[in-house]
Image (cartoon, rainbow, N blue to C red):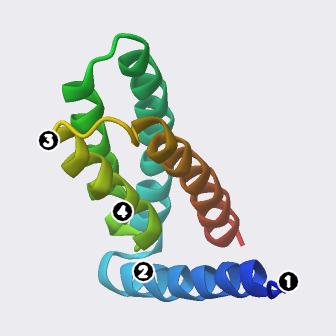
């Protein structure tokens, strides 16, 4: 039987990791800059998701790869490791012309991103 608390544990671990990253960024850049970075991240990820959707409709895999690369870099700032990993996998797959998993990876990226953005906004606005 699966551990019913495993997703709760992962969410708690993700929240703790993000709290540490935000403290690091606050110490390094200042709270005002972190708020600005957060707002810019949320805005840019929304645009990236829309552009990925357009690129998927056009079968423009080079654009999907480039957008995944941008999202990976932006997400790394906040330590979103699962999102960074999924973006990297997508980039590698497209570069190696392995397109079979593109849809499932994009779904994973979208789900991770939505969860990460909500968590980030909640913690920054506390």
Mark identifier at residue 26? 2
Q: Secondary structure at mark 4?
A: helix
Q: Residue at image x 73%, y 78%?
A: 7
In 3D space, how far apart are the residues under numbered discs 4 and 1 (Cα atoms)? 26 Å
Q: In the displayed structure, does residue 40 sit left or right of residue 2?
A: left
What distance separates the C-alpha of mark 3 from that of mark 4? 16 Å
Q: Residue at x 47, y 33 (%)?
A: 49
Give percent across and percent down for residue 57.
43, 13
**Residue at image mark 3:** 95
Asked if marks 4 and 1 touch (Cβ < 8 Å), the reply is: no
Q: Secondary structure at mark 3?
A: helix
Numbered tag placed on residue 4 in the rendering: 1
| Mark closer to the observer (2, 1) | 1
Residue 4 image point, x, y percent: 85, 83
Note whether 88 is above or below 98 in the view shown: below
Alpha carbon distance from label 2 to label 4 = 21 Å
Labelled pair 2, 4 in contact (Cβ < 8 Å) = no
Disc 4 or 1, which lies upstream in sequence?
A: 1
**Residue 110, percent across and down?**
55, 44
Label 4 crowd bin: few (<14), some (14–19), many (20+), radius 10 Å = many
Discs 2/4, front: 4
Question: Which residue occupies the foreground of this view, 82 or 93?
Answer: 93
Q: Is residue 80 visible?
A: no
Indicate the quadrant containing the N terminus: top left, top right, bottom left or bottom right: bottom right
């Amino acid at each position: 039987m699966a551990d019913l608390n495993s997703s709760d544990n992962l969410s708690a671990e993700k929240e703790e990791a993000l709290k540490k990253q935000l403290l690091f960024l606050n110490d390094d850049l200042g709270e005002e800059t972190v708020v600005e970075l957060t707002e810019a991240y949320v805005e840019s990820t929304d645009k990236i998701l829309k552009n990925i959707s357009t690129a998927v409709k056009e079968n423009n895999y080079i654009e999907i790869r480039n957008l995944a690369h941008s999202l990976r870099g932006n997400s790394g700032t906040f330590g979103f490791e699962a999102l960074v990993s999924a973006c990297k996998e997508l980039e590698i797959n497209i570069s190696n012309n392995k397109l079979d998993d593109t849809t499932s990876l994009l779904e994973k990226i979208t789900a991770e991103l939505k969860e990460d953005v909500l968590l980030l906004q909640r913690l920054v606005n506390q």
